[in-house]
């Protein structure tokens, strides 16, 4: 509580004294950013702790059988004849003594019915704590029906003047209770207006609930920022959690459109303006979550360069990051159109983040880098990372089947079928799962590499022996491998061309035995074998 009070006081003073020198929507002035950085974790923890308490209320509202218990332990207080959630009188804040006798429960545990009943029976002398308790129950239900019931109760409390006796906690319950449904934003605005007129000072939980209530789409972000700035001038605390609530509204806009329906220009424009406004306003408060949300929105609207510029800026400013944030940046960098040397850039970022931030990288991060290498045919970079993953060195994660497939692809596209086969054997020895994708890319590597003709068959037999399912692509890839081997091996191949054609047909029949019917790709591969072997008439 002490650290929260200090943070609120410092934030309020800076907001009043330096607001004129900041941008219109800015929260942290340049001279204050260093101080803000040192207090960010405290304020985030305090706000998130408050949000959890108000959600579960296990540690703020004693659910015992009598009065209200210790606020720090949420225990039972006093004696009562009721059971379960019992009455809610107010007990001592530092003890478990008897509190004020609670109102009797005239309704079932149904929060909606309780709110409706209280709305009908409410009078001007009603206890604000009882009203807040019912609003809290409605907030926990999180449905439009409960929100409507809470709104009816809140309006009755406003009309009778009960809201004038609300403390910040009860205002927060109201904010959380009325925000569901299409009218949630309008209702949240009215609750905030009443809170702003009252002696109660908003806190970090208020700011988080206000952001959630007001901000539904990216078009709401900038007006919400203005309201939050007003809240900070009254003592509220805006932290990374609150900023991410706003950014999530932008994410919902850009992720809510299917691939068949491209993002419209209006959606892109709103999302871009809102995202950059939040990023600018939150300088000095951002963390790994807000950074991840920011670059994801920018990438989704086609602003990959801006996303990476923002990431690099955050990296330089020592904004907190985690492996998931780096993974998002790696994916954006890897997918940027018209980029040259993409795999080298992705690998550089992977190793830079790992070394300078001392991050334990995830398999996803490593797989993004390996996939970039597979597209570029960068088998050297892929093998270096692959071997680190197998050995567990340099904070490298354990590989999975996607890792193995990417390494094999990188080697195969460079004509290094021997290295692809070696990586496959290493993965198998290390317990890496093998599936049909791994088998198919390995067969493709055999086709492109100068391998012995038996290698491709060995791969297929090994897959069958280990009960790895095969598909039409497997059969087609094996036939393609045979075609390539015949061209490369020439007279060194045992048997003659007729034998090659017979074995090709035998492979197709083997596919039938494995319930793989010939597809156009299989038939095309078979015809190529026949042409190569001089058996066009058989084809």
Image (spheres, grey):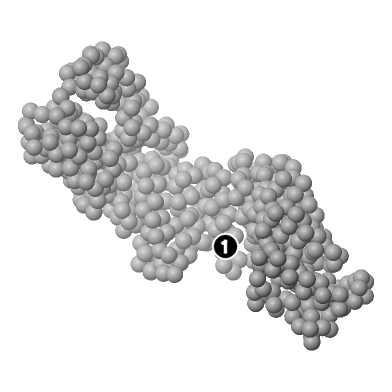
**Residue 357: where, in percent of width, then height?**
60, 41
Name the residue at 74% across, 77% down.
526
- Taking depth in this image into account, of 502 and 136 the one nearest to the observer is 502
Q: Quadrant of residue 234?
A: top left
Looking at the rendering, in which quadrant would you find the N terminus? top left
Q: Is residue 316 above or below residue 335?
A: above
Name the residue at 46% across, 59% down.
298
- Taking depth in this image into account, of 20 and 291 the one nearest to the observer is 291
Q: How many marks?
A: 1
Looking at the rendering, in which quadrant would you find the C terminus? bottom right
**Residue 457: where, in percent of width, then height?**
80, 63
Q: Is residue 331 left or right of residue 260?
A: right
Mark 1, secondary structure of its residue: helix
Question: How many neighbours does mark 1 have within 10 angstroms: few (below 14), some (14-19), or many (20 or more)?
Answer: some
- Taking depth in this image into account, of 375 and 532 the one nearest to the observer is 532
Name the residue at 79% across, 64% down.
456
Q: Can you see residue 465?
A: yes
């Amino acid at each position: 509580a002490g650290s929260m009070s200090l943070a609120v006081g410092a934030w309020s003073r800076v907001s009043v004294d330096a607001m004129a020198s900041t941008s219109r929507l800015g929260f942290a002035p340049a001279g204050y950013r260093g101080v803000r950085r040192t207090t960010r974790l405290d304020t985030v923890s305090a706000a998130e702790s408050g949000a959890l308490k108000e959600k579960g209320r296990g540690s703020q509202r004693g659910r015992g059988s009598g009065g209200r218990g210790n606020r720090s332990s949420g225990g039972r207080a006093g004696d009562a004849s009721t059971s379960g959630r019992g009455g809610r009188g107010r007990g001592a804040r530092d003890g478990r003594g008897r509190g004020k006798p609670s109102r009797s429960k005239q309704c079932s545990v149904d929060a909606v019915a309780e709110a409706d009943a209280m709305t009908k029976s409410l009078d001007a002398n009603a206890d604000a704590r009882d009203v807040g308790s019912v609003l809290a129950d409605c907030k926990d239900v999180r449905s439009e029906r409960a929100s409507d019931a809470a709104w009816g109760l809140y309006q009755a409390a406003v009309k009778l003047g009960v809201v004038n006796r609300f403390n910040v906690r009860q205002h927060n319950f109201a904010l959380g209770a009325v925000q569901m449904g299409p009218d949630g934003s309008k209702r949240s605005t009215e609750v905030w207006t009443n809170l702003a007129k009252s002696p109660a000072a908003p806190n970090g939980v208020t700011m988080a609930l206000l952001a959630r209530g007001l901000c539904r789409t990216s078009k709401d972000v900038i007006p919400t920022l203005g309201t939050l700035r007003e809240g900070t001038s009254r003592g509220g605390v805006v932290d990374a959690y609150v900023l991410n609530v706003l950014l999530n509204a932008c994410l919902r806009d850009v992720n809510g459109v299917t691939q068949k329906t491209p993002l419209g220009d209006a959606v892109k424009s709103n999302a871009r303006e809102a995202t950059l406004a939040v990023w600018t306003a939150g300088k000095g408060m951002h963390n790994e979550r807000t950074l991840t949300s920011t670059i994801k929105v920018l990438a989704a609207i086609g602003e990959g360069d801006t996303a990476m510029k923002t990431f690099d800026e955050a990296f330089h400013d020592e904004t907190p990051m985690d492996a998931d944030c780096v993974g998002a940046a790696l994916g954006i960098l890897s997918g940027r159109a018209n980029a040259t040397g993409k795999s080298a850039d992705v690998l550089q970022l992977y190793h830079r983040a790992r070394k300078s931030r001392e991050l334990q990288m995830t398999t996803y991060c490593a797989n993004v880098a390996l996939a970039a290498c597979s597209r570029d045919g960068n088998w050297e970079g892929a093998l270096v990372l692959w071997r680190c993953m197998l050995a567990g060195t340099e904070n490298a994660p354990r590989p999975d089947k996607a890792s193995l497939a990417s390494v094999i692809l990188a080697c195969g596209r460079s004509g290094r079928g021997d290295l692809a086969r070696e990586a496959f054997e290493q993965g198998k020895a290390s317990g890496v799962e093998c599936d049909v994708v791994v088998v198919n890319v390995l067969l493709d590597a055999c086709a492109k590499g100068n391998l012995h003709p038996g290698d491709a068959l060995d791969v297929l037999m090994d897959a069958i022996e280990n009960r790895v399912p095969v598909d039409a692509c497997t059969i087609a890839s094996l036939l393609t491998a045979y075609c390539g081997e015949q061209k490369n091996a020439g007279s060194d191949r045992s048997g003659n061309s007729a034998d090659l054609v017979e074995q090709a047909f035998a492979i197709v029949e083997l596919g039938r035995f494995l319930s793989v019917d010939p597809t156009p790709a299989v038939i095309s591969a078979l015809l190529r074998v026949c042409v190569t072997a001089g058996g066009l008439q058989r084809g």
